[in-house]
Image: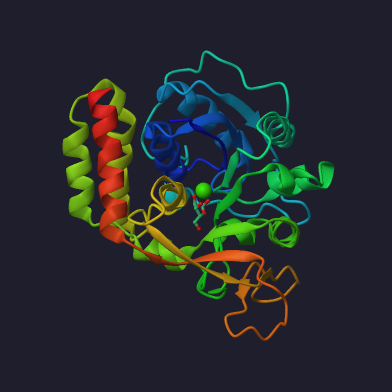
Amino acid sequence: MKKIPIIIDCDPGVDDSYALALANSHEGFEILAITAVEGNLPASVTRRNALCIREELGINCRIGYGAEMPLKKEYTRGAASVHGVSGVGTFVFDEPKLAPDEMPAWEIIYDEAVKHKGEMILFAVGPLTNIAICLEKHPDLPQLLKRFVIMGGGTFGNVSSTNKTAEFNIWVDPHAAKYVFEKMDVWMVGLNVTHAAAVEMTDFDEMVEICGNAKNARFIRELSTFSKKNCMETGADNNVIHDAVAIACVMDETVVGFEDHYVFVEDGDCDNIGQTVIDFEKKSGKAPNCHVAMKVDQKKFVNIIKDMCRHYAQK
Ligand code: RIB
Ligand code: CA
């Protein structure tokens, strides 16, 4: 079977790490590059994590360093309470031996999209700053991609108790997100679906058990241990493996159901900045520009995650 070439733009991040591990375990994908953006942690952290995860998981791909700051907003807050200050819970990487690519993230994305014209799937599971910069420099990017899938947005928010409408990835860089939604055909896996796919604490127990003492599964085992502990001790949403749902929906098209709607991103200086406003009632008169994830088979998703653990345990 011909592998689908993919790039994952991310802000690792615990759930980003699960997503990278999941994509790497799927025989139908060839990971061409992992590109890092500011988000869960500052770019200095997400960049190093991308570099280390490549070697920890044995992925033969390019690493692209991307944006350190949103296009216009200040980078005011990360999510260390969910991911730990290192961004990967309590895991300690070996020192990376390989360097990142000389090209910045947005040039790698375009370079590979040209080389794999019409075949490459681009995943973005962090803020959309790198994607927006790539679009600004290379307006023909949309025509070169097979598909563009994001984890972000949705029908509700998770940024704060006052802003209940914005999802973190969109909120960090709403100006980039607005531009991307205006230019790209977006497959949006939002919070409404990722929360519906939440795993149970007993699932984490089973993931740890499946990983056992296998060296190649140590990263996933420690992420699973941290996810359960952090979730139970702090109430953080580590049981919602957001970014992995975006990967799983392409691995098995029956996992997530989508509806086509017009979506715009609120980027004004207002209480709901960062909201993905979904025109369910077709009041805008505008044609749909987004495939909105609306349903998920949670059991199928959990089984995919456990199969991933088996992959590394048996590697
Ligand atoms: O809102 C959840 C998203 O924000 C996930 O991608 C998580 O990794 C953070 O980037
Ligand atoms: Ca992420």
Vertical arrangement, residue 270 with respect to residue 98, above or below: below
Query: In the rendered view, would you say 117 is above or below 197?
Result: above
Can residue 84 be spotted in the picture?
no
Q: Where does residue 131 sit, x and y in percent of width and height? A: 70, 46
Q: Tell how many labels.
A: 0
Q: Position of residue 56 (x, y in %)?
A: 41, 23
User: Measured along the vertical axis of the image, is residue 132 above or below residue 259?
Assistant: above
**Which colouring convention does the figure follow?**
rainbow
Q: Position of residue 111 (x, y in %)?
A: 72, 30
Relative side of 201 to 145, left or right: left
Taking 296 as reference, is 201 above or below it? Answer: above
Give the quadrant of residue 220. top left
Q: Can residue 116 be spotted in the picture?
A: yes
Residue at the spot 55% in from the left edge and 76% down from the top edge = 162
Q: Quadrant of the N terminus?
A: top left
Residue that protrudes farthest toward the top in the picture: 97
Query: At 66% from the left edge and 22% from the top edge, which residue is drawn?
Result: 101
- Residue drawn at x 50%, y 20% as measured from the top left: 60
Quarter of the image for residue 199 reads: bottom left
